[in-house]
Image (cartoon, rainbow, N blue to C red):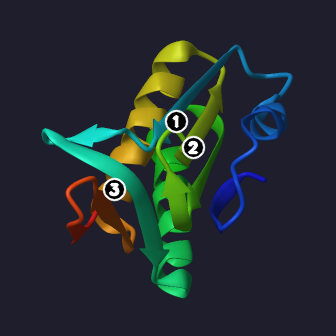
Amino acid sequence: MAGFRISAAPIEVSALRTEMLAHGAGAYASFEGWVREVNEGRGVLALAYEAYGALAQAEGDKVLAEARQKFAILDAACVHRVGELAVGELAVWVGVSAAHRDAAFAACRYVIDELKSRVPIWKRERYADGEATWQHP
């Protein structure tokens, strides 16, 4: 799977982790972002994610390619959900395999930080008080 993917279906972490296994890997780091029930003191009922498909795919692939260049890693992958997600659902997963843990941790952090700042994916939080707002995650 190595690469970036946008998915309307739930993310299957165990299958993704298995795809990251490699004989040269001594380390694996991952990040999972879940829908939380409170954001900035407000009760959250659900989130809806939307993406600018082609641009999100291209920029997500670019971020992963940069991580492979900047860090001594074997592979990196990311899946980001779109659509309506309930509290507790997995919204984004990042996985990195490397020979050593320092590179795996650093690359994983780099990927999620860059994705959140550069990839055109937006979330609409629906609050318990009836209000909803759009945000760039």
Viewer-proximal residue, 2 or 100? 2
Q: Is residue 75 left or right of residue 45?
A: right
- Checking the image for residue 102, the label placed there is none
Give yes or no for contact between labels 2 and 1 (Cβ–Cβ under 8 Å). yes
Query: Do labels 3 and 2 touch, CB within 8 Å?
Result: no
Q: Which residue is mark 2?
A: 93
- Within 10 Å of disc 1 (Cα), the crowding (few <14, some 14-19, many 20+) is some
* Amino acid on which disc 1 is placed: Glu
Q: Residues within 10 Å of mark 2 (few under 14, many from 20)?
A: many
Residue extending furthest toward the front? 129
- For residue 32, the mark is 1
Question: N-terminal of the two: label 2 or label 1?
Answer: 1
To which quarter of the image does residue 38 belong?
top left
Q: Secondary structure at mark 2?
A: strand
Q: Which amino acid type is marked by label 3? A: Lys
Circle 3 Cα neighbour tier, 10 Å, few/some/many (<14 / 14–19 / ≥20) = some
**Residue 58 in sight in this render:** yes
Picture coordinates of residue 66 (x, y %)?
A: 46, 54
Residue at point 83%, 32% (across, down): 18
> Mark 2: which amino acid?
Trp
The answer to whether one can see residue 137 in this image is no
The residue that mark 3 highlights is: 116
Q: Residue at x 72, y 61 (%)?
A: 9
The residue at the point 35 percent across, 66 percent down is 123
For marks 1 and 3, give the CA distance: 13 Å
Residue in front for this viewpoint, 54 or 41: 41
Distance (Cα) linking label 3 and label 2? 12 Å
For mark 1, give the secondary structure. Answer: strand
